[in-house]
Amino acid sequence: MTLLQIASLLIVLAGAFGAINYLFLKLPSSIGILVVALIASFVVIVTDALFPSLTVEEQIRAQVLELEFSEALLEGMLGLLLFAGALHVKLSDLRKAWLVILLMATIGVGLSTTIVGFGFHWLTGMPIMIALVFGALISPTDPVAVLGVLREADLQKSLETKIAGESLFNDGVGYVVFLVLVGLAFPSGDHHATGLWPAVMLFLQEALGGAALGLTLGWLTFRVMRLIDDYSLEVLITLGLAFGGYELAVWLHVSAPIMAVCAGLLIGDIGARHGMSEETRKYVDAFWKLIDEILNAVLFLMIGFEVFAVAFEFDLLVSGTLAIALALLGRFVAVAVPVMMLKPFRNFSAGVIPIMTWGGLKGGISVALALSLPDGEWKPLILTATYVVVVFSIIVQGLTVTRLAERVGRAPELPDG
């Protein structure tokens, strides 16, 4: 199939599954599309098992593997999704919670990676460096999944800012940690960090370079948009920033996710206030919300179909189930440690630790990173465990986080600081 045919099929299926969810399941849009895609996938698998002569499952599996989900997300959709998500997070809100977001996105990711990695090593006998790679790819919360759920939830503003801001930044940091650990675990691969010092330099280059590039490109784009008053052209310029900036970051070997987040934050706040007319702001906001919704639908559809790439062996599924508990433990520590460190100096909303622990959803980025690993003895286990954690996170945690927030977060909101 050509790229256009694949894109057309994904759009058609996303629309059809979205309609089925809207009419019958009535779940939040993205989660509903994932559930319908999973149901359709399992129907195909069961039908093929009952009638082996059909070989439909083999044909679909071949198409799913040919689609290269990892490349499609990491080098295509992710830049647009992160840019769109960052556009709607205000710098003024982030400034109030910057320290806790910074600690969760750095120390928190490190703690979670360590806990999950050592735990998975102990459970499965996997070599420790490879287990830490699994810890790194499963630790970051997925901003796409998190922001999709936040749209449906009615959380306190300060808590929503912490969850959204942290998910945007820990995703970029987690991706860099993943690259570093893959370079250490698979020194013969394409990744270029094979020792401790090169790994540190790679981390600094990716993280700081991505932030610097995003802020620079965002600022230059803002200066150009101040000279223009044409909403269609300004929408096109923001699209060029998201696409071009992401590809430039990849070419320069700096973190493209961090670049997209920083550029989106600058354009969404300073650019919107000082570089756009009221009409332009309305169109830019509506355009990126639509892009966000469409790509979210397609991404969750693709996650549902990735079930064909997963090995359904009993011992792998058991390890995946245990990995859910490990991921939740890692997430709890990643949230609780920064909050407890700062609690003597600032106020936090009621229920911040349980809500942010349960609301730290995993998503397509974890699946894409697992698929991008070099083929080897442990890849099927990592991919199966990742998929089980992600599906549980999106469906179970995604559907219950609002109820949890209502139960434990009823106290009046306290000002940060």
Image: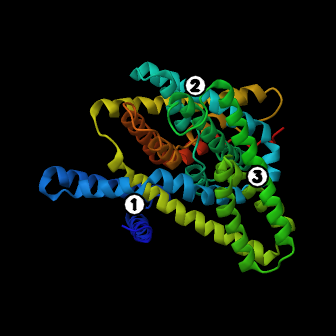
| Residue located at (40% from left, 38% from top) | 375
- In the image, what residue type sits under mark 3? Leu
Q: Comparing marks 2 and 1, which lies closer to the viewer?
A: 2
Which residue is the site of mark 3? 213
- Front residue of 57/161: it is 57
Percent x, y of residue 149: 56, 53
Among numbered discs 3 and 2, the one appearing first in the sequence: 2
Q: Residue furthest front?
A: 188
Which residue is the site of mark 2? 114
Percent x, y of residue 28: 49, 58
Measured in 3D between alpha carbons, the distance from the residue under mark 3 to the one under mark 2, in whole angstroms, is 29 Å
- Front residue of 164/62: it is 62
- Front residue of 163/247: it is 247
Asked whether the residues under the numbered discs 2 and 1 touch, taking CB atoms below 8 Å apart as contact, a structural biologist would say no
Which residue is the site of mark 1? 25
Q: Comparing marks 3 and 2, which lies closer to the viewer?
A: 3
